[in-house]
Image (cartoon, coloured by chain):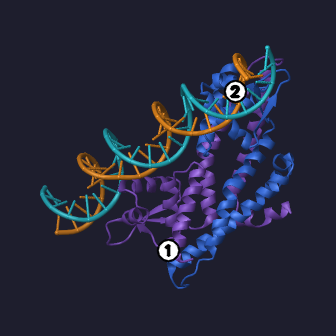
Chain colours: A purple, B blue, C cyan, D orange
Amino acid sequence: MELAEARLKFIEAWGKLGSEWGINRTMAQVHALLMISPEALTTEEIMNELSISRGNANMTLRDLIDWGLVEKQHKTGERKEYFYAEKDVWIIARRVAEERKKRELTPIIKILDQLTEVKGDENDPAFKTFKTSITDINKLAGNVNKTLDTMLKAEENWFFGSILKVFK
Amino acid sequence: MELAEARLKFIEAWGKLGSEWGINRTMAQVHALLMISPEALTTEEIMNELSISRGNANMTLRDLIDWGLVEKQHKTGERKEYFYAEKDVWIIARRVAEERKKRELTPIIKILDQLTEVKGDENDPAFKTFKTSITDINKLAGNVNKTLDTMLKAEENWFFGSILKVFK
DNA sequence: TTTTATTTTCATTTTTTTTTGAAAGTTTAA
DNA sequence: TTAAACTTTCAAAAAAAAATGAAAATAAAA
């Protein structure tokens, strides 16, 4: 396979994967494009490569910056902005985990904590089932949380190396 | 907080979480409702509790069955079908992991493997960056895959117990 | 300053996803 | 059989999400 074809396939696949995980397809595609680009790109170049509008490119890039996956660069003597993506997959994975933890896990844990406080009749099966489910989900969420904290503190080889041996 | 209110809050929160992770909000809500229901429910009951149409309820329940999270039950002497959800959160987590692995991880690994075969000029930065990125993502995906396999074989206390101590 | 290059915003349009509901299909019982 | 009870399907409608593009805003240069 030629580079040009492979690049398009990767961008498409990354976009699809993103959309399956609740991430805007275009955002995932812009990320894919920047990940495989050795140099920082301008908004114009991104628009052309992916056939998207200026507005879309602008908003998507802002989101990617918010996620900590892309940074703005300025070239001396040049007026326009360039965008460059982090390329270390371990750092990328950690950033995504960190953001999703902050945006989704923390809020749901807060709600689950409140729901644990529900009052009712211990002999009512509806009450008992509710309480057990919430308590169990809360415990699982707490463990996911702890595991993510460990992951966020860990070095790259935490995942690529030692931990896997424990499973073997 | 009263049970009725807590139930609604949980259903809402679970639906929101689902939609953030690419799972249809209604499907997550039906799942939530069944998880906190001690007894199996009829389509009719689910329609009423969540104010959804018969068609929607039917398709959503079928999907949940496909995911292995819900099962049909028949009560003797009764004609209509009842739906019951698995309540063990560890089993739920494993089923979801198993399905997403099959539906999303395996296909992307297949594509990444193909993309690793790309041919080009080793001195071309575009080629080098592409190859490095794909190779790294592929390695990470492979490790995620291995970890999930381990998780799928593991007992509940793999997650709730021992492994966490390794991190401490 | 004023002009020009560039970025950002956001009301509107387009696309995608989800839901509806009524007709068709199926199963059991009379 | 026929009818009643219940389930499934799917074209059409509605809702939600994403994208457009032109105007407004901003920033650098003349």
Q: Nearer the viewer, residue B125 or B165?
A: B125
Q: Residue at x 55, y 51 (%)?
A: A23
Q: Is residue B109 visible?
A: yes
**Quadrant where the N terminus of chain B lies?**
top right
* Residue A69 badge: none
A11 on left or right of B136: left
Report the amino acid beneath label 2. Answer: Thr
Dividing the picture into quarters, in which one does residue B43 lie? top right
Q: Nearer the viewer, residue C16 or A26?
A: C16
Circles 2, 1 touching at the beta carbon (< 8 Å) = no
Give coordinates of residue B14: x percent, y percent. Answer: 65, 35
Q: CA distance from mark 2 to mark 1?
A: 51 Å
Dividing the picture into quarters, in which one does residue B6 lie? top right
Q: Are marks 2 and 1 on the same chain?
A: no
Dividing the picture into quarters, in which one does residue A45 lie? bottom left
Give coordinates of residue A81: x percent, y percent. Answer: 37, 64
Q: Residue at x 55, y 75 (%)?
A: B129
Q: Residue at x 69, y 51 (%)?
A: B100
Dot 2: element: helix
Chain to which the residue tagged by mark 2 belongs? B
Task: Say above or below: A101 vs B62.
Answer: below
Task: Say above or below: B82 vs A142.
Answer: above
Chain to which the residue tagged by mark 1 belongs? A
* Residue A4 badge: 1
Report the amino acid beneath label 1. Answer: Ala
Give coordinates of residue B77: x percent, y percent. Answer: 84, 20
Q: Nearer the viewer, residue A165 or A14?
A: A14
Give coordinates of residue A13: x percent, y percent. Answer: 57, 61
Dot 1: element: helix
Task: Look at mark 2 in the image and give the residue it sits on.
Answer: B43
Mark 2 or 1: in front is 2
**Quadrant where the C terminus of chain B lies?**
bottom right
